[in-house]
Amino acid sequence: MAERIPVLKREDGDIPPTSRGKKLLRLVISLVIIILIVLFFRSPLSKISEIQVTGTQYLSKEEVIKELDVSIGDSFFIPGIGQLKKRVSSLKPLESVKIVKNFPGVLQVEVKEYPQVAVQLAEDGKVFAVLSNGLTLPIPEGSVLDKLILSGWKQGDANLVDLCRVLSGLPSYLLADLSEIHPDPSTSYPNRIKLFTRSRFEVVTTIDRLTDKISYLSDIVQNREPGKIIMLEADTYLPYSAENVTGSTQEAGKVKEKDSTQ
């Protein structure tokens, strides 16, 4: 009868050569990856090589880069885009910004500034640009002065900020005939304004009514002779010709009364 040879049990410490080779290979690969990562972050590929700033008119490229607080040679990956946007948000002319990182090394910053809605005349005769957020800035050299004029306004006036916000929301064709806007406050209407048009109309209204009234004003300007228009609780229109006739009649009455007393 044949005898069976007992099977030898493998001790726990015995590891097949194939398993040892796999562990060693994984270890080598991990070390190579770590070395490559270290070399990459020390190489020029991980650094900012170019900063592109576009869309600025009132801000300079240098002002934007200063607020970004980055320079050529800094890390391309840190800080992140969200942090960079937060840094430039303190720039007052800035309405929004788009930041894109193009590998390798190019940081693109696309700036959108608040649009200009008017120009303002200072007491010394200098002309400034007025943005839609009410900010007053020097006009860049070479800019065309084709906006309406705001005169008599004080810097930081809350009504000026409201007016600029309203003007920025109006279509350009409705603003084309406006030449100048003055503050004209009263006890009843603290935000009352006086407008002058290129077609020689004088208009009194309030900032909060301007959006609703300007289309009606456009109709009058196109179809009536120049005169004075009041657009408050009720709308009234008086042509200069009628005003002159009234003034002449009153003056004649005064002269006649004077003659009869002599």
Image (spheres, helix red, strand yellow):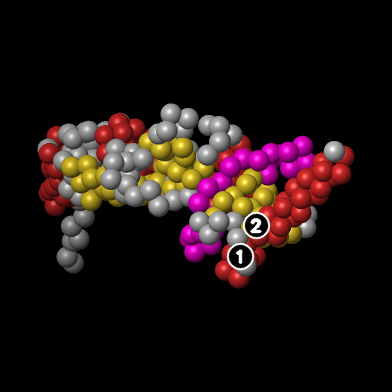
Residue 151 to residue 240: above or below = above
Residue on which disc 2 sits: 240
What residue is disc 1 on?
225
Where does residue 261 sit, x and y in percent of width and height? 87, 39
Q: Give the residue at x 82% y 41%.
A: 258
Numbered circles on residues, count: 2
Using residue 87 as the reference point, say whether residue 206 is left or right of it.
Answer: right
The image quadrant of residue 47 is: top left
Q: Amino acid at mark 2?
A: Tyr
Left or right, 166 with respect to 106, comes to right
The answer to whether residue 150 is left or right of residue 39 is right
**Up-down relation of residue 261 to residue 16 (above or below):** above
Badge 1 density bin: few <14, some 14–19, many ≥20, Cα 10 Å = some
Q: How many angstroms separate mark 1 from mark 2 (CA)?
A: 8 Å
* Quadrant including the C terminus: top right
In the image shown, does 139 or 42 lie closer to the viewer?
A: 139
Check contact, mark 1 vs mark 2: CB within 8 A: yes
Q: Earlier in the sequence, mark 1 or mark 2?
A: 1
The image shows residue 242 at horizontal and vertical percentages of: 70, 60
